[in-house]
Image (cartoon, helix red, strand yellow):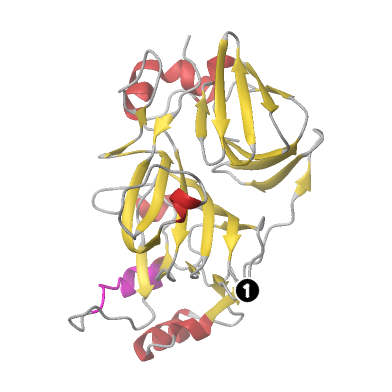
């Protein structure tokens, strides 16, 4: 039987990254100062999660999709790729202002890609850190284009100071940026298409700025979306489990528990990642210890699992609708 799969983290180093993937989440990062992202589960072209242990160690997530698709996806079989991407981000510096296309727009790209709807959960936030999410009321394509031209795009952005635990839902077409000082967990569609519309007028040591994608950004931005604030968690029928996001791309739930939880997978895969504490996961005869920052993909074929916190613990549970 296909068993719960833990993957080797895939690290991305960008100029805005830092060291907190190691210090906060105990990721095995190297010595560099710019570790920006840890991709925990990905099947997107050459970016592939690799199984870390068990009989399938060394296999990529895409190979699992090809070879064990029905056992992995259950009621959602077949799928051409694993449809979700989960990562942790350390924003030591403010990211560029970005926007992502939806599925219809992404299909027209060369090469085609999925759209990118995503959600963030804030794990750490320094005083004064900002999240930029959505446009201020009344912002139009014309006014945003004028602001980009004048280097004042930030004046069009809705911003707020997030608190640890906040969840922010970024639908495709939402203009957004992460401010410096934030560490977040992000669940998204398996896409890496990003259009950069503003980079805070930054230049490198040679006086050069990073490329912008202005026309593409203006084309895919959703001007009706308006300001985006943190989600209001909704209670579920399970004690200690709240629903943060429910959309047509994924469901995101957060559990805060001290007692064991038996989870019926309901013929779906589940991506589970521990934000705080540590948890023992049992699926049949298979047992896995999950520490803070560790992620597991539980195939639909496991049917039921038990999550037993070894101390008060918090984890995310992500799956398809």
Q: Nearer the viewer, residue 260 or 196?
A: 260
In terms of depth relative to the viewer, which is nearer, 159 or 194? 159
Please give left or right for residue 238 compared with residue 219 in the image.
right
Q: Residue furthest bottom?
A: 150
Is 145 drawn above or below residue 250 in the view shown?
A: below
Q: Which residue is mark 1?
A: 160
Residue 112 position in % (x across, y down): 29, 48
Residue 305: say if magenta. no
What range is drawn magenta here?
209-219
Q: Does residue 271 appear in the picture of this structure?
A: no
Q: Is residue 10 left or right of residue 234?
A: left
* Vertical position of residue 198 compared to residue 291: above or below: below
Q: Residue at x 69, y 25 (%)?
A: 308
- Residue pictured at 49% horizontal, 58% vertical: 172
**On-image quarter of the C terminus:** top right
Residue sitting at x 33%, y 75%: 214
Residue at image position (32%, 27%) is 60
Can you see residue 223? yes
Residue 236 image offset from top left, x and y in percent: 79, 38
Furthest-left residue in this view: 206
Query: Could you say which is closer to the camera, residue 62 or residue 307?
Result: 307
Which of 130 and 98 lies nearest the eye of the viewer? 130
* Residue 237, horizontal then vertical, whole percent: 82, 34
């Amino acid at each position: 039987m296909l068993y719960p799969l833990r993957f080797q983290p895939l690290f991305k180093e960008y100029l805005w990254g830092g060291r907190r993937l190691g210090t906060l989440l105990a990721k095995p990062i190297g010595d560099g100062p710019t570790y920006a992202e840890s991709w925990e589960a990905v099947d997107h072209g050459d970016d592939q999660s690799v199984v870390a242990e068990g009989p399938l160690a060394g296999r990529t997530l895409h190979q699992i999709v090809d070879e064990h698709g029905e056992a992995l996806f259950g009621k959602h079989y077949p799928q051409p790729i694993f449809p979700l991407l989960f990562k942790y981000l350390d924003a030591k510096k403010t990211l560029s202002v970005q926007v992502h296309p939806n599925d219809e727009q992404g299909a027209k790209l060369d090469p085609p890609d999925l759209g990118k709807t995503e959600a963030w959960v804030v794990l750490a936030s320094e005083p004064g850190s900002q999240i930029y999410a959505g446009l201020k009321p009344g912002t139009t394509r014309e006014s945003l284009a004028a602001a980009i031209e004048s280097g004042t795009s930030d004046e069009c952005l809705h911003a707020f100071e997030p608190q640890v635990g906040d969840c922010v839902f970024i639908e495709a077409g939402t203009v957004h940026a992460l401010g410096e000082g934030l560490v977040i967990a992000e669940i998204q569609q398996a896409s890496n298409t990003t259009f950069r519309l503003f980079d805070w007028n930054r230049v490198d040591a040679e006086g050069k700025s990073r490329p912008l994608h202005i026309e593409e950004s203006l084309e895919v931005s959703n001007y009706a979306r308006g300001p985006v604030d943190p989600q209001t968690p909704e209670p579920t029928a399970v004690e200690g489990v709240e629903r943060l996001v429910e959309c047509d791309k994924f469901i995101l739930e957060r559990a805060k528990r001290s007692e064991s939880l038996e989870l019926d997978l309901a013929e779906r895969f589940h991506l589970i990642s521990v934000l705080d504490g540590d948890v023992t996961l049992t699926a049949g005869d298979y047992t896995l210890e999950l520490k803070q920052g560790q992620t597991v993909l539980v195939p639909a074929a496991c049917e039921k699992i038990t999550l037993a916190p070894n101390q008060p613990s918090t984890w995310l549970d992500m799956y398809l609708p």
